[in-house]
Amino acid sequence: MVAELHHVCERHKRRRQLMNWISTVEPAPWTIAGFELGPLRFGHCLLIERFMDGGQNKIIDLWRYLNIASRTYEKSVRWLTKDVNTLFPVKRWAFCNTHKKPAKFEHVLRLWNKYVEENTATPQVMMSEGSGTTIGTPYLQTVWNICIHKLNYNPQTIKEAPFGEILWAVLAYNESQGGIRVVDDNLEQVFEKLKCQNLN
């Protein structure tokens, strides 16, 4: 029981560390497998979505993700067009050959997942009554619609906007409209105490 309680508390502590607003809207620069990654941008998410099939990540997926996130949106589109239309570029072969061993691949994939986590971390939220309806529109399209129509983002430049910044803008807008309540540190501490009391 103590081990389970410790696990729950550690998980909550880790989530609080990930939910730091500034680390999401202005994430630290990352270097993964020689790729220098800036903030994950909305356009990056759209490009990466093209290659996500819901299955297990492959080394070629990781190659594309890192190349996309290491460029601006426009440069990513140009690179991706060239990469997809080239039979087997030398740089792709070198990356795949270097990282094909399971231990190396898993290490780079773990770093990639941490990068994505940092760039997309959001706080726990409480939904208002009546807002629990299911929406059929894809998530990224819903985010785009809110940004363009409610937050005055420019449709021509939104793809270069940092994704974490967009997520927090949408959360702040939804909270100001009464659709959600962002769980702040004080409220989260109350929830943790209740959870810990229920475990005892």
Image (cartoon, rainbow, N blue to C red):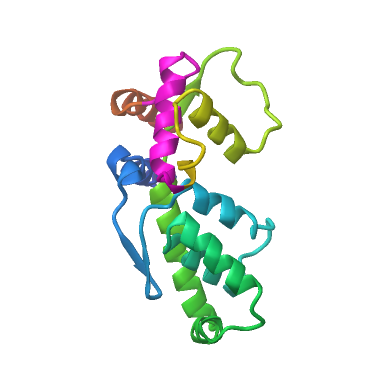
- Picture residue at 31% right of the left edge, 40% below the top: 20
- Residue 144 percent across, percent down from the top left: 55, 35
Magenta region, residue range: 160-183
Residue 118 relative to residue 62: left or right: left
Q: Nearer the viewer, residue 179 or 37?
A: 37
Main structural element of the magenta stretch: helix, strand or loop?
Answer: helix
- Residue 85 percent across, percent down from the top left: 66, 74
Q: Quadrant of residue 24?
A: top left
Q: Nearer the viewer, residue 69 or 14?
A: 69
- Residue 153 percent across, percent down from the top left: 45, 32
- Picture residue at 51% right of the left edge, 50% below the top: 43
Q: Is residue 70 above or below residue 193?
A: below
* Residue 73 highlighted magenta (yes or no): no
| Residue lying at the far front of the rendered structure | 156
Q: Is residue 97 above or below residue 1?
A: below
Q: Quadrant of residue 28?
A: bottom left
Q: Nearer the viewer, residue 19 or 38?
A: 38
Confirm whether residue 117 shows in the render.
Answer: yes
* Residue 170 highlighted magenta (yes or no): yes
- Residue 29 percent across, percent down from the top left: 30, 59
Confirm whether residue 195 shows in the render.
Answer: no
- Picture residue at 59% right of the left edge, 17% below the top: 131
Q: Is residue 24 above or below residue 70?
A: above
For the N terminus, the quadrant is: top left
For the C terminus, the quadrant is: top left
The total number of labels drawn is 0
